[in-house]
Image (cartoon, coloured by chain):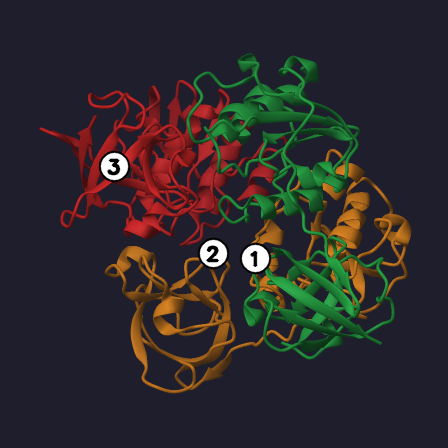
Chain colours: A orange, B green, C red
Amino acid sequence: MKAVILGICPDARIVDITHGIPPGDIRAGAFALASATTYFPHGTVHVVVVDPGVGSSRPALGVQTANGFFVGPDNGVMSLALAREEVRQVRVLENSKYFLPGISRTFHGRDIFAPVAAHLSAGVLFSSLGRETPRYLKLDVPGPDQTPTGWRGEVLYIDRFGNAITNVQPDWSGFGQKCNQLQIRFGGRGRFRTMPLCECYQDVDPGSLLAIFGSAGYLEISANGGSAAEQLGLKVGTPFVLRMRA
Amino acid sequence: MKAVILGICPDARIVDITHGIPPGDIRAGAFALASATTYFPHGTVHVVVVDPGVGSSRPALGVQTANGFFVGPDNGVMSLALAREEVRQVRVLENSKYFLPGISRTFHGRDIFAPVAAHLSAGVLFSSLGRETPRYLKLDVPGPDQTPTGWRGEVLYIDRFGNAITNVQPDWSGFGQKCNQLQIRFGGRGRFRTMPLCECYQDVDPGSLLAIFGSAGYLEISANGGSAAEQLGLKVGTPFVLRMRA
Amino acid sequence: MKAVILGICPDARIVDITHGIPPGDIRAGAFALASATTYFPHGTVHVVVVDPGVGSSRPALGVQTANGFFVGPDNGVMSLALAREEVRQVRVLENSKYFLPGISRTFHGRDIFAPVAAHLSAGVLFSSLGRETPRYLKLDVPGPDQTPTGWRGEVLYIDRFGNAITNVQPDWSGFGQKCNQLQIRFGGRGRFRTMPLCECYQDVDPGSLLAIFGSAGYLEISANGGSAAEQLGLKVGTPFVLRMRA
């Protein structure tokens, strides 16, 4: 993909967001993308290739926002990032003039998305990519539900340190004082575990569990110097019930 | 290596093809290289470091082709890519003026290949690198053998998704109609498995096996949303017998 | 981090040293950094983020040396590299003008180190980053102890090939002739294993153990085409006793 990009747009600056998305995990890809895109300079072209439906009837899309462009499959992987942007126009990638000659069945990242992104980067008009479409696939992102004593939610993402990122955000009632105790139960059964809401990992003993508002803006369950996901057997989508106590 | 390159040729654009080659796996490195090099712009210098014989008597080579340059060990890792190029000249890297001062025993990528590549990129004459040599080591790539009912071949590569890339190419008799059924037996014994020849992964149920002509131009054995290599216990070099049915 | 850097300093050349440091392993990070920094061009800004104490009271530092700059946490991760440099000035990163607005609790690499490094790269005065400090945390690097028959030392680092890098350097008495036999015992008990001191991995049979002075300038224990660390159960910090024989 990088070779193709540089062949079309020799001055392109290419940045890898991650190579660590589990194969075909659209939801993890969407989260990683949404966590990174707002930090890129104005005019960036984001190329997204978590594409288990490659070669099927799923369309390929280009999206113009107030900040730049997105190119990738219409499978929801771009939707969490786009929810944070002002979307201007969505187009179906149809103009094969901007594709590689000869499209493979299994790698549209190389054959369609990369060359289209490079052409956009080199100045091709967005309107020339294909017909406009009013819609794109949006992931059904679970919002946590408030309960009388806290929240019911689920794990959005597991990072490479084993931190489990939940869908609970900090601007909700019940949070605020340093090191409040939380009670949390994962997986819908079993006992509640008590852990402190901390300001940094080292507020607890090595290996101990804690909760912390992390760098993507969500409540994370972590272990100081260890993997909370491994300790607790957490995966993307694991549900939890959270109780807050002062 | 990148630091060394930028010190010699500050304007070099550096692209990693992969960091995922199993340690010392010359054949996997050769396949990954050959799959990528044709997509790079004219004049690219390819630096190749899968080098289990580092420090032994294996020569270090520079190769000039019609499209660019290759620099690396003479162990076959460059040979599959070179088979797709028009080779103009091969030279033994002998001119230590283009090496780092002080050559380590175990990392010629940093001490020899990277600086030579950077000097080439910066405009040094290819002919100044060392004496010409008429030969370089070529991997013995297994060609599949035709049988009365199909092909006998082997696995060339396993990618990070667990797709098993075979040495069977699409322009051979017996292929062509959508979703023909294939029968394939891996490992020289046991039963044949039937799977469809598909146009995309999602032509079969989640987790099911399929065959597909992949992005490197070979028949691949895949699982929709899973790892065929894991399901079937496949490795680089696993032999198979393939029968085709309409 | 790269997005942040390019937003502040669009012409920055960004090179990843490694993404393979085990989570929170300050000592492994320090070794990898020290092995690479001397190869970078004059004026390079090194940004270091192995930061298990993020958000705690550990300071963030900028260091100016004769060759360039270092930016990262004051936890020792920079100290092995700095021991090879002429340190000119150390400053505490306090001037939030050079931070991102809104500092997260868990990712100062993105919010503090990357933007400070980018500002340095773009020409901001080092003296404007914060007050000078006379000290920074230095890792306690184990020096090997000489014994009547050899050395007592420990494993500094395990690379991705499973080579175990020791703290024994080549300019010490007892080394020099090709393929001297070494006797080495790991872990403080059990039997001594005999292995040759080689010039290259292929001096021994496939899979066999050897000792070799490696590319970072230390004695390494390796297996030809295999993982010595796995064969011997070695980890960072594993102690050993080494006897030399002609």
Residue receiving disc 3: C139
Q: CA distance from mark 3 to mark 1?
A: 33 Å
Say what amino acid the circle numbered 1 marks: Ser
For label 2, the crowd category at 10 Å Cα-Cα, with few meaning under 14, some 14 to 19 and many 20 or more, is some
Is residue A52 in view from this perspective? no
Say what amino acid the circle numbered 3 marks: Leu
Mark number displayed over residue A215: 2
Relative to the observer, which residue lies in front, C221 or B102?
C221
Q: Chain of mark 3?
A: C
Residue receiving disc 1: A35
Q: CA distance from mark 2 to mark 1?
A: 9 Å
Q: Are marks 2 and 1 in contact (CB under 8 Å)?
A: yes
Q: Secondary structure at mark 1?
A: helix
First in sequence: mark 2 vs mark 1: 1
> Residue B86's quadrant in the figure?
top right
User: Where does residue B147 sit, x and y in percent of width and height?
Assistant: 77, 65
User: Where does residue B14 sit, x and y in percent of width and height?
Assistant: 63, 34
A164, above or below B59, in the image? below
> Residue C237's quadrant in the figure?
top left
User: Where does residue B178 sit, x and y in percent of width and height?
Assistant: 85, 72
For label 1, the crowd category at 10 Å Cα-Cα, with few meaning under 14, some 14 to 19 and many 20 or more, is some
